[in-house]
Image: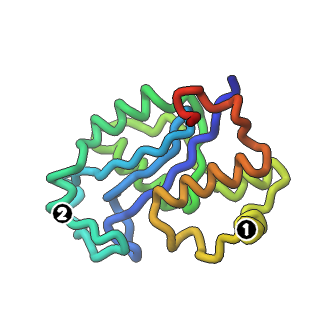
Amino acid sequence: MASLPIFMTSVANSSDNPAFPLLFTWSTPEAQIKEVLVIPDDEWLEDHVIEPNTLDIDETQLYEFGFEASDILAEWTNEFDTDVIYALHPEETSLLIEATYDTKNLDPSFEVHSIHSWFAERDINLDDALIDSGQSTPLHLLPPDEIIALLLQIAVEHGLIHSSDIPETFEE
């Protein structure tokens, strides 16, 4: 079975000065979508605040429903069998991933590249593909899970991911 790409989105504590993650959303090797709120590290909150964001995520939600960085890193270690993941905003996502790893004095085990580059390497212009699929809302304005679902859908529609690549447990 071919290895499916990992697509990831993130929501930062601030749109102007991102320093730490509030939310990560990613596709799994089984073409499922996972989403996790991140409990802030105490050091993050010493120098930064959680500003209002489009998803209305606040500090209370993070503590009630979030996961510690160590739990998230353990899941990524078990789940990501790749050296590269792909993000809509690779620089910001990379910064937030690094902040998560820094809490455990570790370096990320993968690089973050542009989702546009993944499609371009396969001769697909993502912006054109989105328009052709009838998508009129810019990707960055969609909820994170919808972004990931749409990216997977575009990949399937263009034959970049085949149904044989998706484990039977996922297919309906």
Horizontal arrangement in the rendering, residue 96 relative to residue 38 (left or right) = right
Q: Is residue 70 visible?
A: yes
Mark 1, secondary structure of its residue: helix
Pick whichever, 105 or 54, lies toward us: 54
Mark 2, secondary structure of its residue: helix
Q: Is residue 42 visible?
A: no
| Amino acid at the residue labelled 2 | Glu
Q: CA distance from mark 1 to mark 2?
A: 34 Å
Q: Which mark is residue 59?
A: 2
Q: Residue at the location (41% across, 54% down)? A: 96
Task: Please provide percent x and percent y for residue 129.
Answer: 76, 63
Horizontal arrangement in the rendering, residue 78 relative to residue 161 (left or right) = left
Residue placed under numbered mark 1 in the picture: 127
Of callouts 1 and 2, the N-terminal one? 2
Q: Residue at the location (79% across, 44% down)? A: 159
Task: Please provide percent x and percent y for residue 20.
Answer: 33, 58
Horizontal arrangement in the rendering, residue 168 relative to residue 26 (left or right) = right
Quarter of the image where the N terminus is located? top right
Task: Please provide percent x and percent y for residue 104.
Answer: 29, 37
| Amino acid at the residue labelled 1 | Asp
Q: Is residue 164 above or below residue 96?
A: above
Q: Which mark is residue 154?
A: none
The quadrant in which residue 57 appears is: bottom left
